[in-house]
Amino acid sequence: MGLAMLAMSTQYHVEFEPFDLPIRVIRTARKFLDTFGLFTGNLDVIVDDNGRFWILECNHDGEWSWLDPVLDGAISMAFASALAGSLAATESF
């Protein structure tokens, strides 16, 4: 999954909108999460003047619910789907 939000700001106003990350950035983020054994992470990413993406930090349990309405609940649905898949994979019944 590669849900991302683009923040556009003026002096006193910030707007967020959905943004498709390049697949190479998604792969790097997944590798990072896997390396550290993280199920999820909220990554802060910037793009420099040359179009290069930089991952600044990862909040392993960051707050995302305030952005969910912008994506019509896509973040909640992605979490629910991923958790259901994890539970089904570890079920020992």
Image: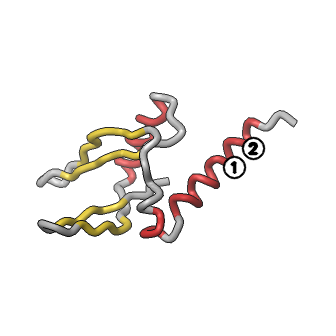
Answer left or right for 14 relative to 78: left
In the foreground, 16 or 91: 16
Tags 1 and 2 touching, CB below 8 Å = yes
Residue at figure coordinates x 54%, y 39% from the top left: 39
Q: How many marks?
A: 2
Q: Which mark is residue 88?
A: 2
Q: Could you tell me which residue is drawn at 39 percent across and 40 percent down?
A: 59
Name the outermost residue toward the top: 36
Q: Residue at x 42, y 69 (%)?
A: 70
Q: Amino acid at mark 2?
A: Ala
Other-residue count near label 1 (Cα within 10 Å), few / some / many at <14 / 14–19 / ≥20 = few
> Is the residue 83 above or below the residue 68 in the image?
above
Q: Residue at x 40, y 42 (%)?
A: 29
Mark 1 element type = helix
The three-letter code of the residue at mark 1 reads: Ala
Residue 93 in the image: above or below residue 72: above
Give the colour scheme shown.
secondary structure
Q: Residue furthest front?
A: 12
Expressed as whole percent of the image width and height from the top left, the position of residue 50 reads 13, 53
**Marks 1/2: CA–CA distance:** 6 Å
State the mark number for residue 84: 1
Q: Position of residue 76 (x, y in %)?
A: 56, 59
Whether residue 25 sits left or right of residue 73 in the image: it is left
- Residue 89 figure quarter: top right
The numbered disc on residue 92 is: none
Residue 52: image location, x then y, percent: 20, 49
Secondary structure category for the residue under label 2: helix
Expressed as whole percent of the image width and height from the top left, the position of residue 30 reads: 45, 41
